[in-house]
Image (spheres, rainbow, N blue to C red):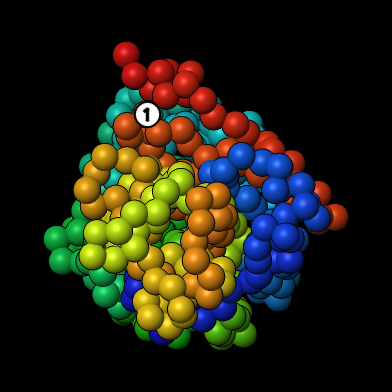
Amino acid sequence: MANSRLQGKTPGRIETPFYAINDTGFPKTGLSRIETPFYVVDEALLEKNLRVLSYVKKKTGCKILLALKGFAMHSTFPLIKKHLDGVCASSPHEARLGKEKFGKEVHAFAPAYSENDIRGLLKTCDHIVFNSFAQWKKYRKKLKGKVEAGIRINPEYAEVETEIYNPCAPNSRMGVTLKNFDETELQGISGLHFHALCEQNSDTLERVLKAAEEKFGKYFSKMKWVNFGGGHHITRKDYDVEKLCKLIIDFKKKYGVQVILEPGEAVALNVGFLVSSVLDVINNGMDIAIMDTSAETHMPDTLAMPYRPYIIGSGNPGEKKYTYRLGGLTCLSGDVIGDYSFDKKLEIGTRLAFTDMAIYSMVKNTTFNGVKLPSVVLVKKGGKAKVVRKFGYEDYKNRLS
């Protein structure tokens, strides 16, 4: 089953905390006093996901890392590191954040590294995965046993329907194919890494593993660890966790290796919201509500995938009494979030809560047009909201020269 984001459909499961239904619920946490727009992450929902991941770790003995590319809200790291083994990074800056704020294992992968990248990563990483044997040969002397080295392989099999998110698409730049795999250069390599999933279930992983074993199985038993990469939607309601556990246990038994997973979305899936207010309502063939947020700047995946984010209490166009097109704050003509219907008219000041906005939002947002970034709010398990980060002019200015 493909994920609702990639299919552009309303998600099948939405966790609805008491404070996100409407304005009347906000005072219970103090959110009504916080100026919109703001991201809000619910610590209780986050811990719910982490308990699922902890179960997988305990049952299988695998390691699970937080993929910082999807979620890097370091004010939540004290909770996350109680459950996970470390982080995986795609740049020296991500790796440094993991080292300084998470304080456990740091694994790195990128399609290529510069000399400066390697110097930075050697200060922060426990594992560095190379995308080619040429890069491995170039830098292996610099590693000098300081960190464990890996090679990313490409099983040339995936079931990702949207090509931009398919790491094993034809002509992909990700991973070494069997044709280019140089078994004479494995000395000093501790593990192999592959990533062929995107928001998928364990039945897809089972087929990916079969393809990977057919091509690279003879090398697995020579390794210390094998990293199954990310894209495992482990905390989604319909995910088959028991199948995942069996796949990991059987793989470990067959090859005698440590198995590593590095989910990004599964850690923070459905734990975050973006709360926004209506600034104006106009009509041009239909009612259009201009929001104080933006698809382009604050939730860029809605345009990149694209997908239609769910709003608590909303319906598809025509399902409810009043239908609106929600427009963003920037001058980009296509800065449109989508068309939604509501039981009541949207008025200036009406607050809307977009769901599943913890992942790939804070890590990807921009200051295009100088639009202010949303504040970041954490709702503690006891129900109290705390603003952990506010942004202003200096954040915009300091990104420029």
Which residue is the extreme one toward the right? 382
Is residue 19 visible in the rendered image? The answer is: yes
At 29% from the left edge and 45% from the top edge, which residue is drawn? 111
Q: Where's the C terminus, which quadrant?
A: top left
Side of 237 where 45 appears, left or right: right
Q: Horizontal and vertical percent for residue 333?
A: 22, 48
In the displayed structure, would residue 295 be above or below residue 256?
A: above
Side of 224 where 204 appears, left or right: left
Q: Horizontal and vertical percent for residue 96?
A: 54, 31
Side of 231 where 34 appears, left or right: right
Which residue is the extreme one toward the left? 171
Neighbours of disc 1 within 10 Å: few (<14), some (14-19), many (20+): some
Could you tell me which secondary element the residue under label 1 belongs to? Answer: helix
Picture quadrant where residue 246 is located? bottom right
Q: Horizontal and vertical percent for residue 88?
A: 51, 48
Three-letter code, disc 1: Gly
* Number of numbered discs overlaid on the protein picture: 1
At 74% from the left edge and 60% from the top edge, which residue is drawn? 25
In the displayed structure, would residue 126 be above or below residue 48?
A: above
At 26% from the left edge and 48% from the top edge, which residue is drawn? 132
Side of 112 where 22 appears, left or right: right
Residue under label 1: 370
Picture quadrant where residue 229 is located? bottom left
Q: Where's the N terminus, which quadrant?
A: bottom left
The answer to which of 310 and 158 lies nearer the viewer is 310
The answer to which of 194 and 16 lies nearer the viewer is 16
Q: Horizontal and vertical percent for residue 154?
A: 28, 64
